[in-house]
Amino acid sequence: MITLNNKVVLITGATGALGNTTANIFAQTNAKLALTGRSQKKLEALHPAFSANDCARTDLCDEQATQDLIDEVIEHYGRIDVSLTIAGGFDMGKRVHELTSDDDFNKMFNMNFISTLNTCKKVILHMQKQGEGRIVNVSAHAATKGKAKMAPYCISKSAVITLSESLTAEHKDNDININCILPGTIDTPTNRNDMPNADFSTWVPTEDIANVMLYLSSELANSVNGAILPVVGKS
């Protein structure tokens, strides 16, 4: 079992299926966790063992709110060793020429890219001061190729890949390892409900994705930096 020896781990999107699983797995590694999501009630319901100092509702699309969150974590723990940017979302609906307003695109872009950008910007400032850190961004395998009726999602997730590559180039000499994972279809209750006729056996369990993030957060991955890593199961 990988242990993180009291490393401070920030997990965004901790109220989602993947975030919840990741928090539960990392809680077994002797890490100190700071969890954030868009609903304080969901945070408290999903993670009752954590104190109020460990769970905070935050709108990561708001840069100042993100700054306030990072400041609170630093004030409470003194540092952030690992940042797992899981927060995001998925919508499938219109073809590109049917997008009648900016709302369809902006929703996905804000949820998937701006939330990741804001988190990385604020976390990296502290990691530079402490001289080390790990960041694992969550994109999607769908970002590698455009798909029908998924343009806003694919574009927003592809931006996360490019952001991760740019950050790696900027901080490769600062002992800040930045990697990005590309999950395939994740086996969650929501996805099963939305796609009841799919072959669930080909989907990726949340536990498998969380364990990849755990590896990238550990000393076992000291030499892994700038990886764009598909985690696609049998798909």
Image: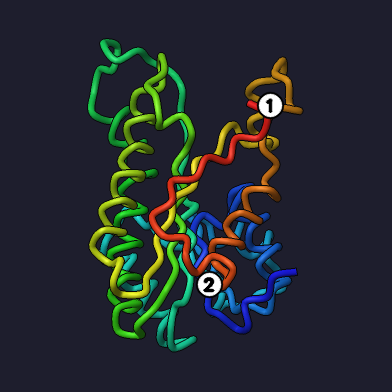
Dot 2 corresponds to which residue? 9
What residue sits 68% from the left and 55% below the top? Answer: 21
Question: Is 224 placed left or right of 69 in the picture?
Answer: right
What residue sits 34% from the left and 52% below the top? Answer: 164
User: Is tag 2's residue or tag 1's residue first in the polypeptide sequence?
Assistant: 2
What residue sits 68% from the left and 79% below the top? Answer: 30
Secondary structure beneath dot 1 equals helix
Image quadrant of residue 198? top right
Question: Disc 2 residue type?
Answer: Val
Question: Is 217 placed left or right of 124 in the picture?
Answer: right
Disc 2 packing (10 Å; few <14; some 14–19; many ≥20): many
Q: Is residue 133 above or below residue 112?
A: below
Q: Position of residue 141 (x, y in %)?
A: 48, 33
Dot 1 corresponds to which residue? 193
What residue sits 70% from the left and 63% below the top? Answer: 24
Question: Disc 1 residue type?
Answer: Asn
Q: Position of residue 150 (x, y in %)?
A: 41, 22
